[in-house]
Image: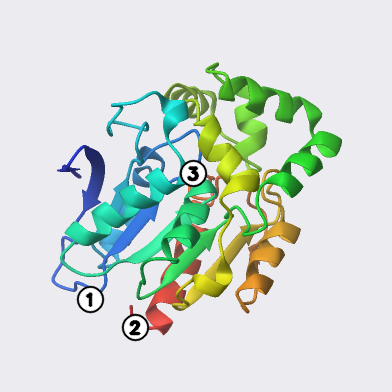
């Protein structure tokens, strides 16, 4: 793995080791409370082994990226600017793969930029986070309380981290490692995704798009993935047996293969 500095941004990179190099690089965008590390657990090395040059960015205030201002000062537009900054410095236009909040960042980016393809994985829907918050209020109130506590700068409870990200078993050591890698999220960005800066589909470029969800996602459940797909005239594809953090689940490779097959079908 190479860690590059794109200005003040941390960008992880895995390059193909073999002779077969696919023409289009991949750029992965993480969700709230995490960083580029979540992609490097499995996805970056796996996609590189399949021939894709694979990058993952840590958005401002996350991972080892710039922290020149308080976390709560970063807006969704700041995260979109981060993405645009990395795209502009890559040798080829990448396919954009966004998870959860990262999926919302990708949608907002498409208002100003294009891509050869887009994968939205359990992405915040263009209608925003309100439906998710209301759903958690009734179905998982303790999880909602803990997410709000993380927003205040606290660390998540291990049980809540497990419930939020995973449906499949996770060993204690791995869960504890993820726990220490997680971090608070910007209040401003969360409010932008809830009410104040939602995507404007009429202004967006419309590249080929895969809308992917997980059967047991507690944060962005399948009905919200269906909302995203309907907005963009796509068909939602729901992976059985997985939770929200599908790139970290025990069966993460099923999600990776699904994305890879979609890319190969489009010669990306």
**Quarter residue 17 falls in:** bottom left
At horizontal 29% and vertical 67% (from top left) the residue drawn is 94
Q: Which residue is mark 1?
A: 23
Find residue 253 and report its horizontal and vertical position in percent.
Answer: 47, 57
Q: If the image is split into quadrants, where does the N terminus sit?
A: top left
Classify residue 62 as left or right of residue 206.
left
Residue 66 lies, with reference to residue 101, above or below; the image says above
Front position in the image: 105 or 143: 105
Classify residue 134 as left or right of residue 50.
right
Label located before the other in sequence (2 or 3): 3
Label located before the other in sequence (3 or 1): 1
Mark 3 is surrounded, within 10 Å at the Cα level, by few (under 14), some (14 to 19) or many (20 or more) other residues, namely many
User: Can residue 182 be seen here?
Assistant: no
Q: Which mark is residue 31?
A: 3
State the scheme by which the image is colored.
Answer: rainbow
Q: Residue furthest top?
A: 154
Find residue 139 and report its horizontal and vertical position in percent.
Answer: 83, 38
Front position in the image: 113 or 217: 113
Classify residue 31 as left or right of residue 234.
left
Residue 21 lies, with reference to residue 10, above or below; the image says below
Q: If the image is split into quadrants, where does the C terminus sit?
A: bottom left
Front position in the image: 54 or 66: 66
Find residue 148 and report its horizontal and vertical position in percent.
Answer: 65, 25
Q: Which residue is mark 2?
A: 267
Task: Estimate the spatial distance between the alpha carbons at disc 1 and disc 2, rounded to whole Å.
Answer: 8 Å
Find residue 182 and report its horizontal and vertical position in percent.
Answer: 47, 28
């Amino acid at each position: 793995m190479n860690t590059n500095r794109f200005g003040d941004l941390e960008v992880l990179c895995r390059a193909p080791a073999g002779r077969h190099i696919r023409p289009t690089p991949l750029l992965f965008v993480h969700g709230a409370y995490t960083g580029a590390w979540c992609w490097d657990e499995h996805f970056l090395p796996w996609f590189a082994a399949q021939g894709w040059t694979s990058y993952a960015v840590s958005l401002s205030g996350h991972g080892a990226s710039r922290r020149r201002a308080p976390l709560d000062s970063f807006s969704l537009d700041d995260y979109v600017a981060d993405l645009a900054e990395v795209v502009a410095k890559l040798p080829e236009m990448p396919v954009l793969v966004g998870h959860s909040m990262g999926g919302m960042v990708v949608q907002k980016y498409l208002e100003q930029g294009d891509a050869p393809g887009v994968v939205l994985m359990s992405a915040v829907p263009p209608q925003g986070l309100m439906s998710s918050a209301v759903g958690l209020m009734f179905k998982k109130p303790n999880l909602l309380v803990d997410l709000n506590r993380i927003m205040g700068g606290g660390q998540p409870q291990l049980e809540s981290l497990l419930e939020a990200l995973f449906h499949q078993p996770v060993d204690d050591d791995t869960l504890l490692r993820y726990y220490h890698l997680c971090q608070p999220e910007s209040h401003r960005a969360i409010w932008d995704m809830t009410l104040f800066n939602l995507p404007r589909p009429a202004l967006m470029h419309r590249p080929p798009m895969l809308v992917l969800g997980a059967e047991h996602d507690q944060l962005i459940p399948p009905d919200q993935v269906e909302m995203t797909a309907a907005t963009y005239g796509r068909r939602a594809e729901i992976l059985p047996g997985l939770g929200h953090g599908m790139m970290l689940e025990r069966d993460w490779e099923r999600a990776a293969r699904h994305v890879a097959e979609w890319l190969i079908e489009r010669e990306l």
